[in-house]
Image (cartoon, rainbow, N blue to C red):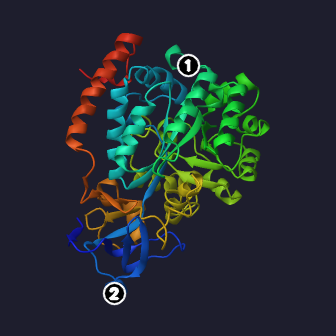
Amino acid sequence: MCSITRWILMSLIIIEARYIIPVRPRQKIIRNGAIVIDGDRIVYIGKADEAKLKYHSDTVIRAHRHVVIPGLINAHNHLFQSILKNIGIDMELVSWLRTSIHPTLASFTDDDFYIAAKWGLIENIKSGVTTIIENHYGPRGYDAVARALIESRLRAVLARGIYELNVLLDILKEEPEKALAHVESLVKKYHGYENRLWIAIAPMHPYNASKELLLKAKELSDKYELIYHTHTAESVKDQELVVELHGKTDVELLYDLSILGPRFHAVHGVQVSPREVKLLAEAGAHVIHNPESNMYLGSGVAPIPDYMESGVNVALGTDGAGSNNNNDMIEAMRFAVLLHRAARKHPSIVTAWDALEMATINGAKAIGLENEIGSLEIGKKADITIIRLDKPHTAPVTDPLGAIVYCANAGDVDTVIVNGEIVLESGRILLFEEEKVREEAEKTQLRILDRAREKFGTKFPFEKFII
């Protein structure tokens, strides 16, 4: 763990580290470095010896067996699924949603959403996340999720998901006008809160929406300059459904409706043609890559090397823990490299540097905050993650970036700083009572599964193995 010494006189935080990977400038690693934080900003990054001559502090973090990186940005998550790990196994996307996720989602209360969100945020923080795009969906629970996001002190985009069509449970369907009015109310209530919580609009999939809803969502996005965050070309089945409904694939439809653009997030972007890659690139859209979810659900392999070659900004997400089945962004970086090397039979088609950028500066670009976060630079916000490198599975270290991407996991995250505030110290969450939340999450999960069985006759796949 990091050694943290506190005095009383001064307001700076000094981090002394064995390695610092700033991300910008690209492909540079500082050995025996230091970062100095004043309030919520970085005021120095460089060699530790020089920092000692210039700065004295009330708080010194001695990370002498650690690597310091920018705070990770989880660009796609569903926090309610943090208590639904492994409830749906061995199914493709649409079947998994309809038989496991939707019945449980419809069984949550607002208190359940709050507890699940807290538990998911604890896991995100403990994997080094400082910013999250939380794609909540259905008609309920947004204030509860927003409350948990605010309490966590993370930066967050709360994407308001909307189901209109092709949903088996009526309780999850919404009238477009009511849903859009609710988005607008969330914007007025939370958008820009403390300059760390923003609202996005998120029709869930094009096969779940009429053209009218997709277009009206774009109007609202333009009115308030909101991110438009939508599951796009995720699987073969969802493309069959969208062609059946609209006569076109997701990307072709969204292009024809003039929805693609610099605020558009194509979440997944797996089942796309070379022409569709080009359309996304020309529009300046962002792709949110969720490699573990795509593997778990058998959705396919997104053409990430093609996106990168075409100039598409690719950010990284874990997706929900119901299809991952965790919120470990370090693990997500590893799969973002290895999946494409295996698929393309090429040992450097995606590199560890690429993965780190997807998880940091590219995520910042996707939410329009690349001038504030995503790299460790003087003047930027102090969003910082410190990772231990002295355990058997990481040590001894030759290449600290390789140690992160190919060796480490969430359990190696030692300290997390958001906006200059320490939220994880020596692996310990400071803002939530972790054990209490875990106990609440376990009880909540049991209640939700029981409700889903009672209300919808749900039979979960895992139950056939348990005697």
What quarter of the picture does the N terminus occupy?
A: bottom left
Q: Earlier in the sequence, mark 1 or mark 2?
A: 2
Q: Seen in the image, is 393 located left or right of residue 350?
A: left
For residue 64, above or below residue 421: below
Q: Residue furthest right?
A: 256
Contact between labelled residues 2 and 1, with CB atoms less than 8 Å apart:
no
What quarter of the picture does the C terminus occupy?
A: top left
Q: Residue at x 45, y 76 (%)?
A: 29
Q: Seen in the image, is 146 located left or right of residue 213?
A: left
Residue 164 in sight in this render: no
Q: Secondary structure at mark 2?
A: helix
Q: Seen in the image, is 32 located left or right of residue 211?
A: left
Q: Residue at x 59, y 27 (%)?
A: 181
Q: Secondary structure at mark 1?
A: loop
In the image, residue 213 lies at what x, y percent?
A: 68, 27
Neighbour tally class for label 2: few under 14, some 14-19, many 20 plus, Cα within 10 Å? few
User: Circle 1 sits on which residue?
Assistant: 173
Tell me which amino acid carries mark 1.
Answer: Lys
* Structural distance between the alpha carbons of marks 1 and 2: 60 Å
Q: Residue at x 22, y 44 (%)?
A: 433
| 312 or 397: nearer the viewer | 312
| 68 or 40: nearer the viewer | 40
For residue 117, above or below residue 458: below
User: Circle 2 sits on which residue?
Assistant: 49
Tell me which amino acid carries mark 2.
Answer: Asp
In the image, residue 424 lies at what x, y percent?
A: 29, 56
In the image, residue 427 lies at what x, y percent?
A: 25, 56
